[in-house]
């Protein structure tokens, strides 16, 4: 498998160089992405591919079910680097329908360490049980929960001291929530975007989703 991976890399590198001899030298010069993407680790949702972006255009952090934990130093370090060093001005929290992490969070089964990681999603499911109960079936409930998880992630990113400091100094940073459909390959805007001067920490995920 590793040998096959190396061969595929060689073929890809050759194709890129043939199409544009300066492709790699240009990428190596400087990193200037326009977007910071917080997404799911699911192998079917690679950020630059689903967004139609080239390497170098998006700075990426991924974890199981795109959960934004206020104590996740990996995410926070990436967020701080994106905002402070790379001067990224568009932050995207992106979930997807058919998310295995959301499914696990709604199952009464042990999942090891994942159960601790997914606790914020279970908390959302309890908080919005009435809303979720209006959906026609379990799959639709999980898809709605995936949307709520994205909106909650947007709120939690906005609450970080990193974003609060950036906004206080006048940085034009905006945070957006998207959801990706595995069945049709489409990104959908959840209409929960937040920019400087528009965030109040009291906003709930439900309020932002309306």
Image (cartoon, grey):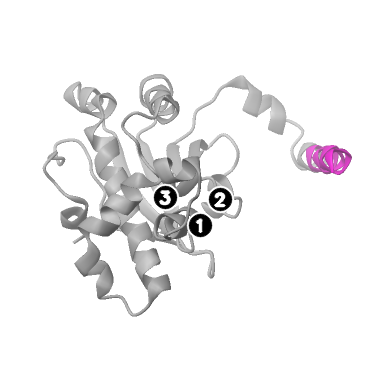
Residue carrying label 3:
94
Which stretch appears magenta? 1-13
Identify the main secondary structure in magenta.
helix
**Marks 2 and 1: CB-CB under 8 Å?**
yes
In the rendered structure, the answer to whether residue 24 lies left or right of residue 127 reads: right
Q: Which mark is residue 100?
A: 1
Q: Earlier in the sequence, mark 3 or mark 1?
A: 3
Q: Choose top left, top right, bottom left or bottom right for residue 85.
A: top left
- Distance from disc 3 to disc 2, alpha carbons, whole Å, reads 11 Å
Element assignment for label 1:
helix
Residue 100 x %, y %: 51, 57
Looking at the image, residue 130 sits to the left or right of residue 82; the answer is left
Task: Indicate whether 184 appears above or below 205.
Answer: below
Vertical side of 176 occupied by 140: above or below: below
Q: Position of residue 8 (x, y in %)?
A: 83, 44
Measuring from the top left, give residue 146's x and y in whole percent. Answer: 38, 58
Along the polypeptide, which appears first: circle 3 or circle 2? 2
Q: Residue 117: x percent and y percent? A: 42, 41
Assign the C terminus to one quadrant of the image.
bottom left
Residue name at image x 34 percent, y 51 percent = 121
Q: Which mark is residue 42?
A: 2
**Residue neighbourhood size for the residue with mark 2, other residues' Cα within 10 Å, grouped as few (<14), some (14–19), many (≥20):** some
Indicate the quadrant where residue 72 lies: top left
User: On the rendered image, what quadrant is the N terminus found in?
Assistant: top right
Front in this rendered view, residue 45 or 148: 148
Circle 1 residues within 10 Å: few <14, some 14–19, many ≥20: some
Viewer-side label of 2, 1? 1
Q: Is residue 159 above or below residue 112?
A: above
Q: CA distance from mark 2 to mark 1?
A: 8 Å
Is residue 6 found inside the magenta-colored segment of the image?
yes
């Amino acid at each position: 498998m590793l040998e096959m991976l190396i061969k595929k890399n060689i073929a890809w590198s050759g194709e890129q160089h043939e199409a544009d001899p300066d492709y790699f030298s240009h990428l190596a010069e400087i990193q200037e992405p326009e977007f910071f993407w917080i997404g799911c680790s699911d192998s079917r949702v690679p950020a630059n591919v689903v967004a139609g972006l080239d390497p170098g255009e998006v700075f990426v952090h991924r974890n199981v079910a795109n959960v934004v934990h206020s104590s996740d130093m990996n995410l926070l370090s990436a967020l701080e680097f994106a905002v402070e060093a790379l001067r990224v001005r568009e932050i995207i929290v992106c979930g997807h329908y058919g998310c295995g992490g959301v499914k696990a969070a709604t199952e009464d089964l042990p999942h090891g360490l994942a159960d601790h990681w997914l606790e914020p999603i279970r908390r959302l499911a309890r908080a919005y049980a009435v809303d979720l109960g209006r959906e026609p079936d379990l799959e639709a409930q999980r898809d709605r929960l995936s949307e709520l998880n994205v909106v909650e992630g947007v709120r939690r990113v906005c609450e970080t001291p990193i974003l609060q400091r950036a906004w206080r100094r006048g940085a034009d940073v905006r945070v957006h929530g998207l959801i990706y459909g595995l069945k049709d390959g489409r990104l959908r805007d959840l209409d929960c975007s937040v920019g400087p001067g528009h965030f109040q920490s009291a906003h709930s995920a439900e309020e932002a989703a309306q």
